[in-house]
């Protein structure tokens, strides 16, 4: 390929990268700057100029789709002709190919098998270590093992490494380490040889090259030029393999953007990209900043999002320059509640469809998969075709199907307390049904557990919404409603509007993008923002900011960013827009003015000790500020808990369905003397007064409850 042909149609910076001499080259490529075109042209130029033959080039990336696109472009450029071709593969595919070839030389005739489904082995190791083996727990354990192996941490090193990395394992790190060790042991006990998982492919490949000079010499004679795409996403294990491939050589081209690092939870680290010029002081460094994907308006917002970043990664930010014709300004929108936000997004999408934008060129992106539920409902009602990318539709998810089945089983019971399955009691029944499935009072640790918890919470909140419109809602009617929603949400097989998480959207682009649910606690996600007991995870918060940046840069022309102040229709507006939007919203936008919380229709209760308004549900239930002195009768509280335990067993319901801990504490503090005083305690209505009032008042008077007397 002549020089003129190699750089035909390229901008000056892309041309520099293509024509750079053999040796270390680092291309910092922003979103939409044509990095794939640049690196494939570079490979073609190196081959056509005789620097290396096509068969001596190994190009690695992170997805089979990206590797396939690279191979396709190289074929279009005529690289290799009818002879050996450039090897464009994922890290794991390349290692698998090499290990199959070198295994007999390194290990001998010991057979090995690829363990491509690890779940069963991790489950067995978890069982032996005394762990529950439900799907979500095993998946979270599997994620921790993969992170540890990708980060080059052995089982005995895991607890300390997890603490340094601020991991949130599903159990104590020492217990996870025991499962990890058990998993490694089980893999090597097969009667038909040893089993290697995908991380082992990389470990064994690196070990073969590091420990066997003959193997290393043969490999390095075969491959002489290396190209790594998405270099900001390499793990320490992948870098070790790359180092083993290279040896003492430096014929390496890397491409990446540290400001698109959003997979650190898998062990990915941008440090190798950031340190490239230190490792290779003579490296050619190229910055690609001309954005051919998005309009200048979208590019400007992307620059301002990442311009607020802090830390070392922020120092490498690229100032993108939009190359497309001007388009509409990004839209910012604030809504009272999530249903209103979803309906407004559906309305805006319907207009785009009428204006000729293809449904397949529109995406709604959110932080977690459970957020899709409101949009699936809104699109179903509006008749907008959609597809869920990187996951299943809300009602098709395993945890949601399991939860609905559990509700059906609850409804078929003949021992439910009277009216427990209707009206105001229905939410308590739904919660109680979901507790064994993973519903807890606070968000759990572990990615899979959090996803399950979010889905179960969404079902509870949906029940609450339905009750707002139908106060006498029964469990049977709730199940009919859920079934109707599940049946209606069967999107056609033709392409429609894409619903996807921000992580699943990486590497994709659309004409129109709607970034939704942008509230503090969702983006950034709650578990990195800290609370009264834990400090914020600053590195985690910065990664969340980069996630927003990735979302913005997915849009070519139309971009809307929105958030809702309440989860449920007509609910209290306690949410606030994401901190990342500070300074980004134009003064001319209606969303620049924060909507004040609507005044409550009810008179707010006051503390019976200090007289101040009670602001939280816990303080409201206690009847006092949580910090004010308590006159708790501890003996009465013990008696109340014993009584509640007996009643819950008798009724076959969780204890908190009878009364929550806070309600019992309030009773033990306020010691109501009659029915009127008892029902004044939040959480005790007419039905619970009728069912439990006599027992509770008897206990307050120091008597034994009638139904617990020995006869």
Image (cartoon, rainbow, N blue to C red):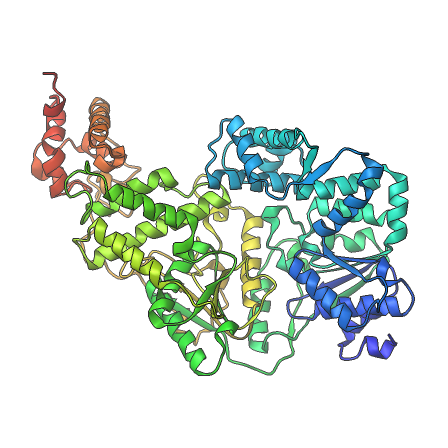
Picture coordinates of residue 98, whole percent (x, y): 79, 47
Residue sitting at 51 percent across and 61 percent down? 389
Q: Return the x and y of residue 295 as percentages of the image width and height.
A: 58, 77
User: Does residue 288 appear anywhere in the picture?
Assistant: no
Q: Is residue 555 above or below residue 456?
A: below
* 354 and 632: which is toward the camera: 354
Q: Is residue 322 visible?
A: yes
Quarter where residue 567 is shown: bottom left
Most extreme residue toward the front is 192
User: Foreground: 507 or 542?
Assistant: 507
Q: Position of residue 346 (x, y in %)?
A: 39, 71
Q: Is residue 511 left or right of residue 314?
A: left
For the C terminus, the image quarter is top left
Q: Which one is in front, 34 or 316?
A: 34
| Image position, residue 102 (x, y; %) | 82, 42
Image: 347 above or below 645: below
């Amino acid at each position: 390929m002549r020089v003129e042909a190699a750089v035909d149609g390229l901008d000056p910076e892309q041309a520099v990268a293509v024509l750079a001499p053999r040796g270390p080259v680092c291309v910092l490529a922003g979103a939409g700057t044509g990095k794939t075109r640049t690196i494939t042209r570079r490979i073609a130029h190196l081959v056509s100029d005789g620097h290396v033959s096509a068969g001596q080039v190994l190009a690695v990336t992170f997805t089979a789709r990206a590797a396939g696109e690279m191979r396709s472009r190289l074929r279009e450029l005529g690289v290799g002709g009818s002879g050996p071709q450039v090897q464009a593969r994922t890290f794991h595919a390349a290692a698998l190919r090499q290990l199959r070839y070198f295994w007999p030389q390194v290990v001998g005739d010991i057979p090995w098998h690829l363990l491509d489904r690890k779940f069963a082995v991790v489950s067995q190791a978890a069982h032996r270590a005394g762990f529950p083996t439900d799907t979500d727990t095993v998946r979270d354990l599997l994620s921790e093992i993969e992170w540890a192996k990708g980060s080059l941490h052995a089982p005995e090193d895991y607890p300390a490494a997890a603490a340094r990395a601020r991991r949130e394992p599903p159990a104590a790190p020492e217990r996870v380490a025991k499962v990890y060790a058990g998993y490694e042991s089980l893999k090597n006990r097969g009667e038909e040889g040893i089993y290697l998982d995908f991380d082992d492919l990389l470990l064994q490949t690196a070990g073969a090259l590091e420990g066997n000079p003959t193997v290393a010499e043969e490999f390095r004679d075969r491959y002489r030029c290396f190209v790594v795409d998405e270099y900001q996403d390499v793990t320490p294990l992948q870098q070790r393999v790359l180092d083993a491939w290279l040896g003492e050589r430096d014929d390496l081209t890397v491409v990446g953007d540290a400001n698109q690092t959003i997979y650190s939870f898998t062990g990915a680290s941008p440090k190798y990209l950031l340190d490239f010029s230190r490792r290779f002081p003579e490296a050619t460094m190229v910055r690609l900043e001309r954005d051919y994907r998005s309009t200048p308006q979208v590019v400007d917002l992307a620059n301002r999002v990442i311009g607020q970043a802090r830390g070392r990664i922020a120092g490498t930010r690229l100032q993108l320059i939009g190359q497309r014709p001007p388009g509409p300004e990004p839209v910012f929108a604030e809504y009272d509640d999530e249903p209103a936000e979803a309906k407004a997004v559906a309305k805006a999408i319907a207009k785009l469809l009428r204006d000729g934008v293809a449904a397949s060129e529109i995406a709604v992106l959110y932080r977690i998969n459970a957020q899709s539920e409101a949009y699936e409902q809104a699109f179903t009602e509006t008749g907008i075709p959609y597809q869920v990318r990187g996951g299943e539709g809300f009602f098709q998810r395993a945890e949601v199907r399991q939860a609905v089945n559990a509700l059906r089983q609850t409804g078929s019971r003949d021992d439910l307390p009277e009216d427990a399955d209707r009206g105001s009691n229905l939410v308590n029944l739904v919660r109680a049904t979901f507790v064994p499935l993973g519903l807890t009072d606070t968000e759990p640790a572990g990615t899979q557990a959090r996803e399950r918890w979010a889905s179960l919470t969404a079902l509870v909140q949906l029940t609450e919404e339905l009750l707002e419109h139908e106060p006498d809602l029964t469990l049977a009617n709730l199940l009919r409603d859920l079934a109707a929603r599940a049946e209606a949400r069967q999107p056609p097989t033709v392409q429609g509007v894409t619903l996807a998480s921000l992580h699943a959207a990486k590497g994709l682009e659309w004409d129109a993008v709607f970034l939704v649910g942008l509230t503090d606690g969702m983006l950034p996600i709650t578990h990195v923002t800290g609370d009264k007991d834990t400090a914020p995870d600053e590195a985690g918060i910065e990664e969340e900011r980069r996630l927003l940046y990735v979302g913005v840069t997915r849009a070519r022309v139309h971009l809307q960013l929105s958030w809702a102040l309440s989860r449920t229709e007509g609910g209290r507006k306690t949410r606030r827009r994401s901190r990342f939007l500070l300074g980004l919203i134009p003064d001319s936008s209606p969303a620049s003015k924060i909507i004040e919380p609507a005044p409550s229709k009810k008179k707010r209760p006051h503390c019976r000790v200090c007289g101040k308004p009670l602001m939280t549900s816990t303080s409201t239930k206690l009847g006092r500020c949580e910090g004010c002195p308590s006159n708790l009768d501890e003996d009465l509280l013990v008696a109340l808990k014993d009584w509640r335990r007996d009643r819950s067993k008798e009724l076959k319901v969780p204890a908190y369905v009878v009364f929550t801990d806070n309600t019992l504490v309030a009773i033990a503090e306020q010691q109501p003397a009659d029915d009127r005083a008892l029902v004044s305690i939040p959480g005790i209505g007419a039905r619970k007064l009728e069912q439990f009032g006599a027992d509770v008042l008897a206990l307050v008077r120091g008597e034994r409850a009638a139904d617990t007397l020995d006869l």
